[in-house]
Amino acid sequence: TDSPATMGQPGTREGRVWPSWMVEDLKGSGIPVDAAEQAGFYPVDQSELRDLLGFDIPEPVEAYAIPFLDPVTAEPMLTSAGHPFVRVKFEHPVQIGDSKAKYASPKDSGNRAYIPKLAHEAAERGERLVITEGEKKALSATLHGIPTIGLTGVWGFWDAATDDLLADLHPYFQAGRELVFALDSDAASNHGIAHAVHRLNQCAALRGVALR
């Protein structure tokens, strides 16, 4: 197995060691550790999870944080309560409420979109963008030449507070732009996902965007 990697990027938690499972997890997603560090990813201790998420994890688990950063300023995006928005990836699924979860977002955080800097720059050049579920998928695809924005779930494009398209996505839903909504292969047979796709198509059509 790979040796643990030591972090030292500005804006991350310097000197922390990436355990081998984290390195392998990132490698499995097509994300080199140095690219993850540049994107601000960092390992977190059990004691930090409550501060990040606003609730307790009832079992010992290792994890790493995926901060959502403004693609222009690199400042943290904020939750509806004004705290930095992060997604936490656990080493193994943990019990949260009535279900097991591999990822978690801060309590009552609302939705934010994960927008890699390179994807934003591609959009400014007029390139076609992909929208998908998952921040790691978005970063990996972008690193491999497919500019992609990540959602925290299939309804991650929706702002319940405004009952409209998430403000993070407004700059990319501009008239004349072509967007691709890429979902898992079983999406067509899932009625909940079909509803989300229909609503996103409505958002796109209202703004003159071609969504495929």
Image: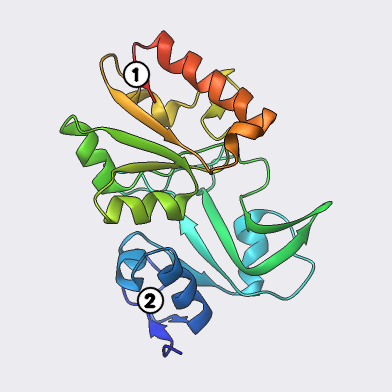
Indicate how the structure is coloured in the image: rainbow
> Of the numbered discs in the image, which one, if any, rests on residue 210?
1
Visible residue check, residue 160: no
SS at circle 2: loop
Q: CA distance from mark 2 to mark 1?
A: 43 Å
The image quarter in which residue 186 lies = top right
Tell me what residue is drawn at x 50 percent, y 38 percent.
112
Residue 58 screen position, x and y as percent: 79, 67
State the image coordinates of residue 191 (x, y, percent, origin top left): 68, 28
Q: Would you place residue 31 above or below residue 7 in this image?
A: above
Q: Identify the residue at horizontal 34%, vertical 59% (top origin).
A: 39
Residue for point 70% across, 65% down: 93
What is the quadrant of the C terminus in the image? top left
Q: Secondary structure at mark 1?
A: strand
| Position of residue 109 in the picture relative to residue 112 (left or right) | right
Q: Nearer the viewer, residue 177 or 14?
A: 177
Residue 22 place in picture, x, y as percent: 49, 75
| Residue 36 visible in the picture | yes
Q: In terms of sequence position, does the residue under pointer 2 or pointer 1 come before the other?
A: 2
Q: Which residue is mark 2?
A: 14
Amino acid type shown at disc 2: Glu
- The mark total stands at 2
Residue 201, position as x, y percentages in the image: 48, 18
